[in-house]
Structure formats: C-alpha cells, structure tokens
Image (cartoon, rainbow, N blue to C red):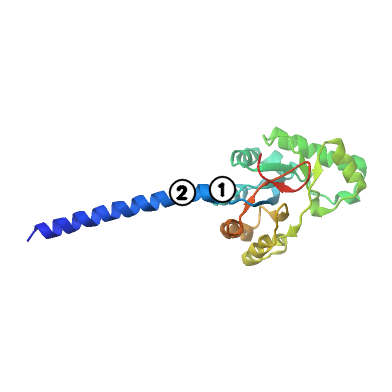
C-alpha cells in the first residue's frame, strides 16, 4: 500500500523536470528568433540627463533589452560623471544637449559656441566619449547654430514624434506615441519622467510585436539604424 504513493511522487517529480526542460528550451530559443525579427529600427532618445534618475532609467532599459541615445547637458555631466559612465557601460549612446539648456536661437555665435564646446568637453571628461550627435534645447535651431555644429563635426538631431512626457503625458499616452514610430524615426523623451520609465516595458513589448528594434542614430543620415 506504501508503494503507490512513492511511485506517484516519483512520476510527479519526473513530470516537473520534463516540463522545466521544455520551458527552458523554449526560452533559450526565443531570443534568437526575436533578434532575427528586426525588420526596422527606431531611435529612443532621452534628454536632460544625467541625474539621480539615470540609474532607474538604465535599469528599466536593460531589463527590457532596449538601447537609447542619451542627450546629456554638459553641466549635468560635470556634476554626475559616474552616471555618464553608467550610461556607456549600459550600452547607451551619448549625445550633446548643450551645456546649460538655453534658447540657442536667442544667443550670439560666441555664446552658442561656448554652450556646445563646453558640453562636448564635459561629456568627454566624464567618460562619455566625444559626442557626434547634438540635440538643440527645445528643438530650436537656426543657421548660426548649424554653422557651430559643423565646426565640431556634430549632426543635429530633432525628432519625428514628441512623447509629450515633458507636458505630463500619461504612461498610456507615451506608449501610444512610441507606437507611431516607423522605421528610421526618432522619439523625444526625458530621463526625469516617471511616466516614461513606467512605459518602458510596454514600449519594448510593442516594438517587438511590430518587429522593430531600438537602434542607434546615424551621424551620417540622422536616422535610426542597426547598431554597429
């Protein structure tokens, strides 16, 4: 009478082991299939860092297999060099977002030059490399800004879709904004937005469902492309 329970227990254990083996195999096979399904690339960008929010943002991106371009302010890079290094270590790309986030089109050429060059130096000193991409604060630009960018070999990057996270957009609205991206396009987001961080898991899921992957922004074309 005691044999049956032992046999039943052994059968249950073997069944669980078999199920675990199948599940593990399924997970192991899932990653290559997803990687092979990148039929296009989009540019996820985050402005205004680095700051005390950088670590949480990087964790969310890494946990969901996403890479992004971080447009850092020079003054923030100087104040938070460890966070700049953390961005690079997490596989992110680092761009220039001016030194102090002014309205560049209201400044003279010498002031614009100072904003851009000081940010380049601060980011490089913090371990972020020498940026090749520049995002003008507020998306405001003109011929003078462009001429200074050319002097430093920087490509100006605006955006195709504005997430409106700076305007207190909800997490749902941010997810919907990312859903409007098509191959090669770029979205504006900000690293200090809690709603944006909360949206990241759904952003990753939705991009995967559309066979889109988070790519780098090409300095040659200014469009999102496959990471090199």
Residue 154 marker: none
Q: Nearer the viewer, residue 50 or 18?
A: 18
Instruction: Report which residue position mark 2 lands on.
Output: 29
Across and down, in percent, residue 19 comes to 33, 55
Across and down, in percent, residue 113 comes to 87, 39
Instruction: Report which residue position mark 1 lands on.
Output: 35
Mark 1 and mark 2: Cα distance apart in space: 11 Å
Q: Quadrant of residue 128?
A: top right
**Looking at the figure, which quarter contains the C terminus?**
top right
Label 2 SS: helix
Tell me the crowding category of disc 2: few under 14, some 14 to 19, or many 20 or more residues within 10 angstroms, Cα based. few
Q: Nearer the viewer, residue 215 or 145?
A: 215
Across and down, in percent, residue 31 comes to 50, 48
Q: Earlier in the sequence, mark 1 or mark 2?
A: 2
Tell me the crowding category of disc 1: few under 14, some 14 to 19, or many 20 or more residues within 10 angstroms, Cα based. few
Q: Nearer the viewer, residue 75 or 22?
A: 22
């Amino acid at each position: 009478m005691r044999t049956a329970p032992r046999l039943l227990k052994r059968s249950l254990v073997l069944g669980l082991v078999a199920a675990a083996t199948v599940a593990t195999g399924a997970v192991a096979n899932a990653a290559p299939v997803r990687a092979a399904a990148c039929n296009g690339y989009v540019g996820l960008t985050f402005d205004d860092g680095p700051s005390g929010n950088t670590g949480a943002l990087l964790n969310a991106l890494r946990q969901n297999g996403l890479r992004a371009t971080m447009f850092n302010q020079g003054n923030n890079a100087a104040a938070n060099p460890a966070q700049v290094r953390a961005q690079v270590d997490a596989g992110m790309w680092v761009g220039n977002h001016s030194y102090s986030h002014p309205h560049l089109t209201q400044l003279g050429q010498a002031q614009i030059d100072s904003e851009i060059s000081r940010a380049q130096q601060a980011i490089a000193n913090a371990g972020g490399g020498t940026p090749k991409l520049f995002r003008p604060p507020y998306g405001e630009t003109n011929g003078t800004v462009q001429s200074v960018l050319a002097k430093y070999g920087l490509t100006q990057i605006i955006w195709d879709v504005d997430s409106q996270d700076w305007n207190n957009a909800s997490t749902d609205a941010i997810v919907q904004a990312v859903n409007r991206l098509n191959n090669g396009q770029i979205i504006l987001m900000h690293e200090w937005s809690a709603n944006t961080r909360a949206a990241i898991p759904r952003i990753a899921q939705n991009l995967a469902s559309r066979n889109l992957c988070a790519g780098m922004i090409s300095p040659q074309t200014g469009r999102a492309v496959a990471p090199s």
